[in-house]
């Protein structure tokens, strides 16, 4: 089995991982592995949301004009 080392984990992420591990009665390593397996399996894929319908269509010409005007 291969090893992985994750460095510089932000404090809030570490805190959440520790909390989830505790809730599931797992070590932090086993919880991280379970989360990775879930995220990488096809079961956790979420469908794309429906497009937002605005007041006007966003066309290539509109995008070009907006970029030229510096409104990006």
Image: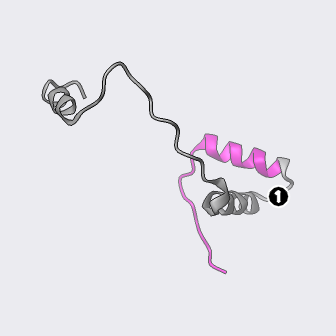
The residue closer to the viewer here, 55 or 11, is 55
- Residue 40 % position (x, y): 61, 62
| Residue 3 lies within the magenta run | yes
Which image quarter is the N terminus in?
bottom right
Query: In screen coordinates, is 39 left or right of 69?
Result: right
Picture layout, residue 60 above or below residue 2: above
- Residue 11 % position (x, y): 61, 42
Which image quarter is the C terminus in?
top left
Residue closest to the far top:
55
The residue closer to the viewer here, 28 or 65, is 65
The residue closer to the viewer here, 65 or 21, is 65
- Residue 54 % position (x, y): 38, 22
Residue closest to the far right:
25
Picture layout, residue 47 above or below residue 34: above
Q: Secondary structure at mark 1?
A: loop
What crowding class fits label 1: few (fewer than 14 Cα within 10 Å), some (14-19), or many (20 or more)?
Answer: some
Query: In screen coordinates, is 45 left or right of 29?
Result: left
| Residue 35 lies within the magenta run | no
Q: Residue at x 20, y 36 (%)?
A: 60
Specify start and end residues of the magenta stretch as a single range.
Answer: 1-22
Type of colouring: one colour
Question: How many numbered tags mark residues here?
Answer: 1
Q: Residue at x 24, y 33 (%)?
A: 59
- Residue 19 % position (x, y): 77, 44
Q: Which residue is mark 1?
A: 26
Residue closest to the far left:
68
The residue closer to the viewer here, 41 or 6, is 41
Query: In screen coordinates, is 12 left or right of 28?
Result: left
Q: Residue at x 63, y 57 (%)?
A: 39
């Amino acid at each position: 089995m291969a090893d992985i080392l994750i460095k510089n984990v932000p404090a809030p992420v570490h805190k959440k991982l520790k909390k989830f591990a505790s809730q599931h009665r797992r070590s932090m390593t086993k919880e991280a592995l379970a989360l990775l397996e879930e995220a990488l399996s096809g079961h956790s894929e979420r469908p794309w949301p429906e497009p937002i319908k605005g007041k006007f269509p966003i066309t290539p010409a509109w995008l070009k004009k907006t970029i030229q005007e510096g409104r990006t």
